[in-house]
Amino acid sequence: MKMNLVNRLATIHTDKTIISLNSNICPCLTMNRIDPPHFLWFLESIEQGRPVHSIKVDKETAEEAILALHRMIAIG
């Protein structure tokens, strides 16, 4: 399993065009650690009311992030 999320997604979803915003490095040092087991652990912690690694942002940023997530889901 490839560690880089972008490369892993590109390998799995060959019917889609998936590119990195920076072909030299992964700009987020922890993004390459996202794998199914850790993602499941993260989602389960939210479901159990014990979210981990929460990030708080202002209302406008949150609204824009939610819009971006809805757009990504609609494309998938």
Image (tube, rainbow, N blue to C red):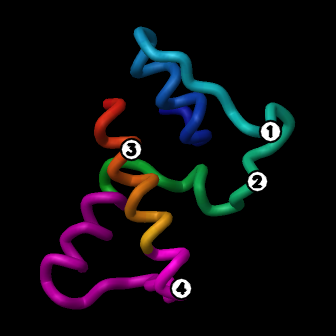
- In the image, taking residue 18 as reference, residue 9 lies left or right, namely left
Tags 1 and 4 touching, CB below 8 Å = no
At x 51%, y 30%, the residue is 8
Residue 58: x and y in percent read: 53, 87
Amino acid type at image mark 2:
Pro
Could you tell me which secondary element the residue under label 4 belongs to? loop
Question: What whole-number distance in Å separates the C-alpha atoms at marks 4 and 3?
Answer: 20 Å
Q: Which residue is mark 3?
A: 71
Query: In the image, which residues are magenta?
Result: 38-62
- In the image, taking residue 32 as reference, residue 76 lies left or right, namely left
Along the viewing direction, whichever of 64 and 51 lies nearer the viewer = 64
Q: Which mark is residue 22?
A: 1
Could you tell me which secondary element the residue under label 1 belongs to? loop
Question: What whole-number distance in Å separates the C-alpha atoms at marks 1 and 4?
Answer: 25 Å
Is residue 72 on the magenta stretch? Answer: no
Amino acid type at image mark 1:
Asn
Q: Which residue is mark 2?
A: 27
Mark closer to the chain start, 3 or 1: 1
Which residue of the protein is positioned furthest toward the right in this rendering?
24
Question: What whole-number distance in Å separates the C-alpha atoms at marks 2 and 3?
Answer: 22 Å
Could you tell me which secondary element the residue under label 2 belongs to? loop
Amino acid type at image mark 3:
Arg
